[in-house]
Amino acid sequence: MSEPANTIEHSAEHASFTIERDYPATPKHVFAAWAQAEAKNNWFARGAEHSLDFAIGGAEHLTVSTAAGETYTYDARYYDIVENERIVYAYEMHRDETRISVTVTTVLFEASAEGTHLRYIEQGVFLDGQDTPAAREHGTRELLDSLGETLRGEGEGA
C-alpha cells in the first residue's frame, strides 16, 4: 500500500552550540536582564506577547507573528537558578501548531574586567526538518547582540 503524498518524513537532528559574549555591566545587572520581565521585554520579547515566572519550576511564554502570517510560540520551564551565576531551562518551539524543536539551555554569568562574560550553551533536538541548528544559533546570536545593545544603551557599568 502506498503512503499519501503529504506524509511527513519524521526525523530528529541533535545539535549543540555555545555562544560567548562580554557585556559592559555587572553579572547582577546582566542576570536581571534575564530574570525581570520588564527588562527581558527590552531585548528578548520586543513587541511580542510575553509572560515570565522566573523561578525554579516557573514558566516563560512568548508568542510572535511574522509578516508571512506564521505564529511562533516559545514555552520554557526553569530547572535551576543560581542568582547572578547560572540559569538552566528547557524550552520547546512551535511554528503554528507544529513543534519544531525541544532544547535544554544553560546560561552562565562570570565577572570579567569588562563587566560580565556570558556563556550560552544550547543542546537541542530539531524535529522533522522544520528548523535547523544553524538557524537557531543565528537567531540566538541576534538575541544576545540585542541584549548587548540594550545594556550599552542603559549605560550601566556598576
Image (cartoon, grey):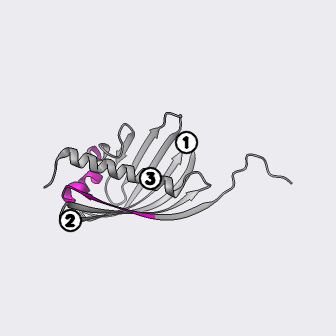
Image depth: mark 3 or mark 1 in front = 3
**Residue span colored magenta:** 17-38
Q: Quadrant of the C terminus?
A: bottom left
Q: Which of 81 and 68 is in front in this view?
A: 68
Q: Name the residue under label 3.
A: 138
Q: Quadrant of residue 76?
A: bottom left
The quarter in which the N terminus is drawn is: bottom right
Label 2 crowd bin: few (<14), some (14–19), many (20+), radius 10 Å: some
Which one is earlier in the sequence, the residue at label 2 or at label 3? 2
For residue 69, the mark is none
Q: In the rendering, at what x and y percent does residue 39 appear?
A: 26, 46
How dense is the environment of label 1, judged by Cα within 10 Å: few (below 14), some, or many (20 and up)?
Answer: some
Q: Mark 1 points at which residue?
A: 96
Q: Residue at x 36, y 43 (%)?
A: 45
Find residue 126 and report its horizontal and vertical position in percent: 55, 58
Which mark is in front, 2 or 1? 2
What SS does tag 3 mark?
helix
Q: Earlier in the sequence, mark 2 or mark 1?
A: 1
Q: What residue type is labelled 3?
A: His
Q: Earlier in the sequence, mark 3 or mark 1?
A: 1
Which residue type does callout 1 highlight? Asp
Disc 2 on helix, strand or loop? strand
Spatial separation of the CA atoms under disc 2 and disc 1: 40 Å
Disc 3 packing (10 Å; few <14; some 14–19; many ≥20): few
- The residue wearing badge 2 is 111
Q: Does residue 30 belong to the magenta stretch?
A: yes
At horizontal 32% and vertical 45% (from top left) the residue drawn is 43
Q: Residue 4 location in percent, x, y?
A: 78, 48
